[in-house]
Image: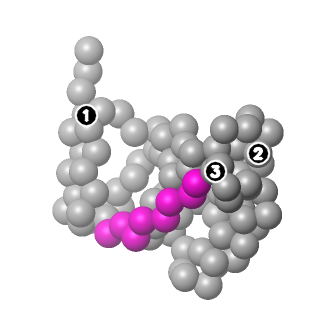
Amino acid sequence: MYIVSYDIKNNKKRNKVAKILEDYGERIQYSVFMLDVNRTVLFQMLERVEKAIAKSEDSIIVIPAFADNIISLGTPMVAILPKNSKGIIVCGSE
């Protein structure tokens, strides 16, 4: 599993990258996606993203994630932990 975050200034490019990432995983924050893919698929996704960004001003960060180590505070957009995970979700209500 990987967490992918991006910082892209141009709206058109940012939307294009988001659509590419939606092909591979789920959005868990506005500019953060969770991808449950193998390394081969990850690098295929990165090749697509590389064509859509300006590397001199945009950034993509890919972080390997392990469900047992994920801690979430608040209400995530999607379920981010498998049912049998030992990760922690702290949900709050206002």
Name the quadrant containing residue 89: top left
Q: Residue at x 73, y 55 (%)?
A: 53
Lower sequence index among marks 3 and 2? 2
Q: Residue at x 72, y 65 (%)?
A: 50
The N terminus, quarter of image:
bottom left
Name the quadrant containing residue 30: top right
- Assign a secondary structure to mark 2: helix
Q: Nearer the viewer, mark 3 or mark 2?
A: 3
Q: Is residue 15 above or below residue 42?
A: above
The magenta span reads 59-66
Q: Main secondary structure of the magenta part?
A: strand
The image position of residue 64, as x and y in percent, is 40, 70
Task: Kindly indicate whether the residue at mark 2 contacts the one at mark 3 (C-beta within 8 angstroms).
Answer: yes
Query: How dense is the environment of label 2, judged by Cα within 10 Å: few (below 14), some, or many (20 and up)?
Result: some
Q: Amino acid at mark 2?
A: Lys
Q: Nearer the viewer, mark 1 or mark 2?
A: 2
Q: Residue at x 80, y 39 (%)?
A: 12
CA distance for labels 3 and 1: 32 Å
CA distance for labels 1 and 2: 33 Å
Q: Is residue 23 left or right of residue 60?
A: right
Q: Which residue is mark 3?
A: 58
Q: Residue at x 54, y 81 (%)?
A: 38
Residue 54 shows up from this direction? yes
- Assign a secondary structure to mark 1: loop
Lower sequence index among marks 1 and 2? 2
Q: Nearer the viewer, residue 30 or 58?
A: 58
Residue 23 shows up from this direction? no
Q: Which residue is mark 2?
A: 13
Q: Which residue is mark 1?
A: 91
Q: Is residue 23 above or below residue 36?
A: above
